[in-house]
Image: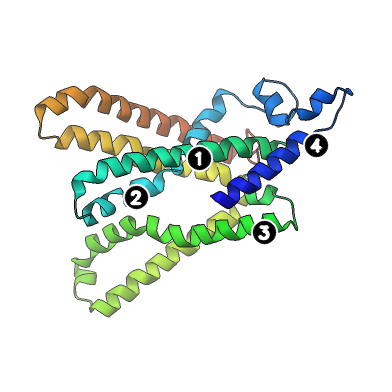
Amino acid sequence: MAVGLIAAAYWAITAVVDTPEDDGDAAAALLSPALNAANWGTYGPGIYLAIWYPLFLGIASLSFEGVAAMALPIENSMANPAKFPNVLGYAVVLILILNLLFSCVMVVAVSGISDDVPGVITRAMPEGSTISQLVSACLSLELLCTYPGNAIPLFKLLERSTAAGRVFGGMRRLARVTYFSIIRIVVVAFTGVTAFVLADAFDIFLSLVGSVANASVLFVFPGICFIASSTHEDDKRRYRWAAGLVVAFGLTAAVIGTAIGARTALKGILPASH
């Protein structure tokens, strides 16, 4: 994250300072295309209004998928689980601040690179630059280290649900571990191949994943579980409306985001590389 922020800040400053002076006004050289676009100008990347917000929400919810995946395992492994809500709250706020900071800097940075920014941000970085190679290496290392951890709850659920069955229940432990290790390798390899094949529309793909899966995990399921499992009637009456709003927001975001993302990806109504 630190390396990415440094690189983004470097490109942002370069984009701001090196903007061509079209009308000879020196002040115009200090304006980035992103700043003009924010004022609804026509200079810089195209700005799509309402239709892009659901896609943005899908990407934004994907940023918190690690928290949703690891929350219960971490809470169950704590010596004092009662302190977990405070820790989780601080972690979510920190992630939100870092993502907002990174996003704001990157908007300014990539707007000076091209009017047609690829969905995979590493493809928009200057080729051959040392800092670009460093960012790509750090990003690859981060994915390599965090992806298996984020997928642990999914794999554990799969293993526990099938271990007692007739097919896997009679297996020896070594055979069962080998079998599920192969499944993990296949899932990771499939993800990598998908990312490679959909490189030109990877942003739309991530938005669909966020809209379909993460909107449910982050908004719908927690609200429903709270309403269904709360044992205190006072808490249920007090927070039922809030949980209902969260569920409604999640369902709305999932339906609209999935519909727009699918239409964008399948029919090519909007350029997938923006």
* Mark 3 / mark 1, whichever is N-terminal: 1
In the picture of the structure, the residue carrying the numbered disc 1 is 99
The mark nearer the N terminus, 1 or 4, is 4
122 with respect to 174 (left or right)? right
Q: Residues within 10 Å of mark 3 (few under 14, many from 20)?
A: some
Residue found 31% across the figure and 43% down from its top: 88
Front position among marks 2 and 1 = 1
User: Mark 4 and mark 3: span between their CA atoms?
Assistant: 22 Å
Q: Would residue 25 be found to the left or right of residue 228 on screen?
A: right
Query: What residue did someone put label 3 on?
Result: 133
Q: Residue at image x 39%, y 71%?
A: 182
Quadrant containing the C terminus in the rendered view: top right
Residue 116 visible in the picture: no
Query: In the displayed structure, would residue 17 be above or below residue 239?
Result: below
Instruction: Tell me residue 102's x, y (percent).
Output: 56, 40
Disc 2 packing (10 Å; few <14; some 14–19; many ≥20):
some
